[in-house]
Amino acid sequence: MYELHDVVKSYGQGAAALHAVDGNSLSINAGEFVVVEGPSGSGKSTLLQMLGALDRPTAGSVLFEGNDLALMPDRQLAALRLRTFGFVFQQFNLVPTLTAVENIEAALAPLSGSRRKKHERAMRLLNGVGLADRATHLPSQLSGGEQQRVAIARALVTEPTLLLADEPTGNLDSRTTIEVMALFQALNEQGITIVIVTHEPDVAQYAKRIIEMRDGRILRDHPVMDRRDAAADLATLDTDPNDSLENAA
Ligand code: ADP
């Protein structure tokens, strides 16, 4: 799916230049579930922006399905971002004046189809993230985890093959984090490739592969041993309420 060759992203010029991403090569295959983990400032978001064609490298190349993103015409890039990539952010980015289902319908606006069809589709997506009964709630009437699930449903409207998520659990407590990770695991089971950027080591144990970044460089890149099943962790929490969340996470 992706091939990155000696990718550098610098800000500023000359001696003052800061290399947010400092010469990394890697590949990501379809069906992977990757967590890019590292402390704040290690270049994770910058890397994700380049994967999502939201930014271009200063040097090196990002190939998506064999095509160099930096050489793609803008129209093709826009189509990729609209159709192929789904984006999920820490802040949810829901429109506060629209209900849950309307937020998803709004994302369907650029696509063809009748209003009724779009509404049905939005409801199916909400149902898929377990929130059909919250359809008419405004974001302010939803918990953080519910808002993020709406945001994930919205990211799924165009049936992306890839979800790119920047700190998707950054605003969530530990139980809700596991709920959202269960959703990502289920989506990955359905064949969607997932790349999550996070500074939370707990999140990585639900992925299949961890790329550890430090100071713009890949420090380690390895499969997850003893991968956790988020749905099973939730079931454990539900059956044994005395078990602390920290034990499960
Ligand atoms: P992370 O996602 O790991 O927290 P970032 O990719 O956001 O790290 O940032 C990596 C480094 O690049 C940081 O030192 C950050 O301050 C710097 N940086 C990121 N974006 C910009 C920008 N637009 N202009 C200048 N410096 C930036």
Image (cartoon, grey):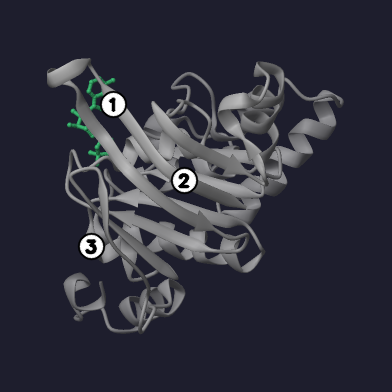
Q: CA distance from mark 1 to mark 3?
A: 26 Å
Q: Secondary structure at mark 1?
A: strand
Q: Amino acid at mark 1?
A: Ser
| Location of residue 232 by image quarter | bottom left
Contact (CB < 8 A) between labels 1 and 3? no
Q: Amino acid at mark 2?
A: His
Pick whichever of labels 1 and 3 is earlier in the sequence.
1
> Is 151 in front, or is 21?
21
Ligand 1: quadrant of the figure: top left
Query: Residue 105 location, x and y as percent?
Result: 67, 28
Query: Residue 228 location, x and y as percent?
Result: 38, 78
- Nearer the camera: disc 3 or disc 2: 2
Badge 1, how many Cα within 10 Å: few under 14, some, many 20+? some
> Is 95 in front, or is 16?
16
Badge 2, how many Cα within 10 Å: few under 14, some, many 20+? some
Is residue 167 in view?
no
Contact (CB < 8 A) between labels 3 and 2? no
> Is 153 in front, or is 18?
18
Q: Secondary structure at mark 3?
A: helix
The structure residue drawn at horizontal position 51% and vertical position 56%, both measured from the top left corner, is 27
The residue where tag 3 is placed is 201
Q: Which quadrant does the C terminus fall into?
A: bottom left
- Residue 71 appears left or right of 11: right
Q: Secondary structure at mark 2?
A: strand
The residue where tag 1 is placed is 10
The residue where tag 2 is placed is 5
Residue 100, above or below 96: below
Q: CA distance from mark 3 to mark 2?
A: 26 Å
The structure residue drawn at horizontal position 71% and vertical position 45%, both measured from the top left corner, is 159
